[in-house]
Image (cartoon, rainbow, N blue to C red):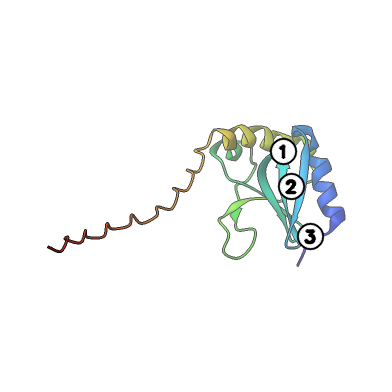
Amino acid sequence: MASNADFVQYIVDQCSGAGEIAVKKMMGDYCIYCDGILFGLICDNNLYIKPTEEGATQLKEVILRPPYPGAKPHFYINEIDNRDYLTAILRATIPALLKSKPKSKPKPKSTPTPTPKPKSKPTP
């Protein structure tokens, strides 16, 4: 089930106290960003935030659940009507996401070194 556009806009409005909120549609659901940082997902009309220790300190109740089958668990946010609460969670989460270890760049594929051809002996 895809997320409803009105619900997505409501979440954007509710999170706007934390910074510039943007969403990008992804297969019927949405990635949600604050000041260019991906912090969560809106899936099936539910808000999920990437888990961080700092964000957990702001939650009234920590509920971890995957936003879709096969996904890593995220904080499931069931209290979306409290703008101040969402702002506090995001203000704790975003800096934690920024300081988390960046993913290493993939190593370039090595090309096999050609084996030298044996030199032919001159014929007498």
Report the mark closest to the observer, 2 or 1.
Answer: 1
Q: Could you say where residue 119 lies in the image, as x and y percent from the top left?
A: 21, 58
Tell me the amino acid under the disc marked 3: Ser
Tell me the amino acid under the disc marked 2: Glu
Q: Nearer the viewer, residue 7 or 63?
A: 7
Tags 1 and 3 touching, CB below 8 Å: no
Q: CA distance from mark 1 to mark 3?
A: 19 Å
For residue 89, which quarter of the picture? top right
Asked whether, in this view, residue 59 is left or right of residue 116, the answer is right
Q: What residue lies at 49% left-to-right and 44% top-to-bottom?
A: 105
Q: Residues within 10 Å of mark 1 (few under 14, many from 20)?
A: many
Disc 1 on helix, strand or loop? strand
Residue annotated with mark 2 = 79
Q: CA distance from mark 2 to mark 1?
A: 19 Å
In the rendered view, would you say 76 is above or below 94?
Answer: below
Residue annotated with mark 3 = 3
Name which of mark 2 and mark 1 comes first in the sequence.
1
Q: What residue lies at 83% left-to-right and 59% top-to-bottom?
A: 4
For residue 95, which quarter of the picture? top right
Residue annotated with mark 1 = 34
